[in-house]
Amino acid sequence: MTRAKALPRRWWLFRPFDLLARLWPVWRKPKGALVIRIDGIGDMVLFHSTFARYPEALGLPPGEITLLGCASWASLVPQLFPGCRFRAIDEHRYDKNPFYRFAVSLWVRRQGFALVTCDIFMRKPLVADSLVYVSGAPRKIVAKPYQSAKTQRAFDWYLERCQEVIDTGPYPTHEIIRHARFVSALAGRPIAPAAPRLPWPLAPRTSARPYAVMNFGGNEPGRRWPLERFLEIAQMLAARGLQVYFTGGAAEVTQRQALAAAGRPADFVDRIGVTSLPQLLDLLKGAALVLSNDTGPAHLAIGLGVPTVVVIGGGHFRSFVPYPPEATPDAVRFVFRERGCFHCFWNCTEPHEQGRAFPCIDALGAAEVLTATEAVLASAVSKNISDAETAN
């Protein structure tokens, strides 16, 4: 067994600030609940359906529940999480800047919450668990986290100060199942896992033609299916009459030249680096198809009910993708080839060219991804026919 490491230096650096916030006097009676969701856009999507069960599980009206989330998806909260209170923070600053950290911690403490919950499995103890601790809430309920030798000592310290630690299952239990198990424990009755469903209105169309969206970006180069294969699929879709929108963030702006070199200005639309998050949801919602790497927009597209194909590797295989069968919509496909090196946590040890896709992703050819796109388009057409027949 790997020996646990000592508490990190930052824990000691932050300790005076955290302790001061934790001991700050709050004179009113504790009230309401704080739900901590300090993670990315995709994680938020996987949690969304379960959050609707929290008022029932906690026995509180939505207005007495505060969601503490990330600034990266704050612009979506009014539409996706109506009725609850919300506070956004920059989790990276909280993890590094002691003065910003103290300001956030003091705000949390001064709210006087009666209950704090955190069901994140893969989390940072010096972020999520610190926020639970500084709240000073009389009831602190958290999920048992994924621990390594590096984080075990810190987690042990924080978990000892919680009233309840809920075991949502071993790695690699899928996040959707974890969320359902956690809220089931809160509610005291079984609540079934559910596919994401995001309530987002359909925006006025900006294109007269049906279109597909290619989201070719990703968290790091190794997790991105090669752009030339996205372009190959795009050429095939354009030949079938679809316009193709390309989306990405600042890291993908350098790929604009390759997109322009494809020579189809009437068919390929460059939206790289110019789309806000709400605008991206508008674009995804109206798409006939979304093809994406394993990143936040893929989960958004699935949650919006759009036919979606996701190219995935094995870093956290089955923890986030692919979805469990009971929570996978018919018009969604995850393309992968399982390998013995899966569950590497993206610390790839297989030989690969720096800056290129990891072998588990690079091995996936355009033909198998095209097969998946044809399957989801056929499924969507079948559903539309079925819905029309039901309506008549």
Image (spheres, grey):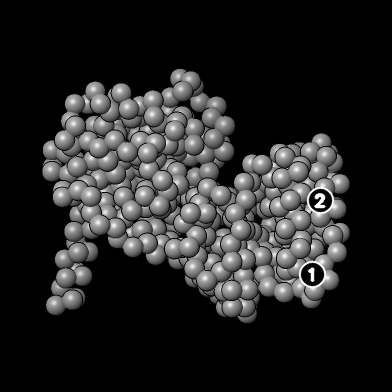
- Read off the residue under disc 2: 18
What residue is at 61 percent from the left and 58 percent from the top? 87
Which element carries disc 2, helix, strand or loop?
helix
- Relative depth, front residue between 98 and 384: 98
Residue 127 in the figure: left or right of residue 383 = right
Q: Position of residue 105 (x, y in %)?
A: 74, 54
What residue is at 45 percent from the left and 20 percent from the top? 353
Mark closest to the chain's N terminus, 1 or 2 = 2
Which element carries disc 1, helix, strand or loop?
loop
Q: Nearer the viewer, mark 1 or mark 2?
A: 2
Q: Quadrant of the N terminus?
A: top right
What residue is at 76 percent from the left and 49 percent from the top? 102
Residue 358 in the figure: left or right of residue 124 = left
Looking at the picture, which amino acid does disc 1 mark? Answer: Pro
Q: Quadrant of the C terminus?
A: bottom left
- Read off the residue under disc 1: 138
